Image: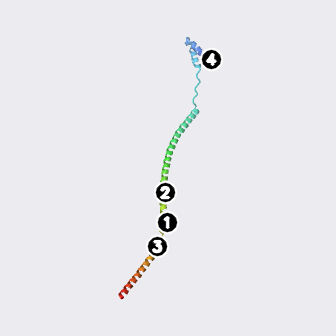
Amino acid sequence: MFRTPAFRRLLTTAATTAPAAATEAAPAAAATFRNTPLPPPKKPVGAIRGGVIGFLLGIVLAGTAGYYYLVDDYQVYSNALLNNVEQLGGSVESIRASLKKADKLEAEVKALKDNAAKRDELEKARKEMLKALDNLTIEHLELKTRVWAAEQDIKKH
């Protein structure tokens, strides 16, 4: 009944127009203060709404921190991987150079093998040499025999 806007206006205007009768109006003023329009009460941030907002804020902060550390780790590991790839490239180049040297040496060894005398060829040459030496020894002995015979004929005559 005292909550209607018209009654409130009446009480507020009566309290402002009658300051002279302060002693009689004390109960009326007390009623006026009780019935003045109060601002609408602020809605308290409820436990559920505050919990949800806090939860979402926590997720955002944790996600941001996690993303920062993830990007930082990604850069560190990416740089490490890049250094390893560069070292691997250098190793590959040194292996290629070693393989070229090995191929060159292999070609030289093959050429030497092709030009070198084989064991059976050496054995054949040795036998021929021994045969020639035997023939020379025989011819030398025959010549010696002829010279001796010629000396003997000279001594007889």
Furthest toward the left, the residue is 155
Classify 10 Å Cα crowding around label 4: few (below 14), some (14-19), many (20 and above): few
Check disc 4 and report the residue beneath it: 7
- Mark closer to the observer (3, 4): 3
Check disc 1 and report the residue beneath it: 114
- Ranked by sequence position, the earlier of labels 4 and 1 is 4
| Relative image position of residue 122 (x, y in whole percent) | 47, 71
Tell me how far mark 3 sits from mark 2, CA to CA: 38 Å
Check disc 2 and report the residue beneath it: 100
Please report the residue visible at 49 percent of the width from the left and 53 percent of the height from the top. 93
| Relative image position of residue 94 (x, y in whole percent) | 47, 54
Tell me how far mark 1 sits from mark 3, CA to CA: 18 Å
Count of numbered circles on the image: 4
> Tag 2: residue type?
Lys
Furthest toward the bottom, the residue is 156
Tell me how far mark 3 sits from mark 4, CA to CA: 145 Å
> Tag 1: residue type?
Asp
Question: Which quarter of the rendered picture does the C terminus lie within?
Answer: bottom left
> Tag 4: residue type?
Phe
| Relative image position of residue 70 (x, y in whole percent) | 52, 42
> Tag 3: residue type?
Ala
Question: Which quarter of the rendered picture does the N terminus lie within?
Answer: top right
- Ranked by sequence position, the earlier of labels 3 and 2 is 2
- Ranked by sequence position, the earlier of labels 3 and 4 is 4
Badge number at residue 125: 3
Tell me how far mark 4 sits from mark 2, CA to CA: 109 Å
Q: Answer above or below: position of 77 versus 96.
A: above
Quarter of image, res 155: bottom left
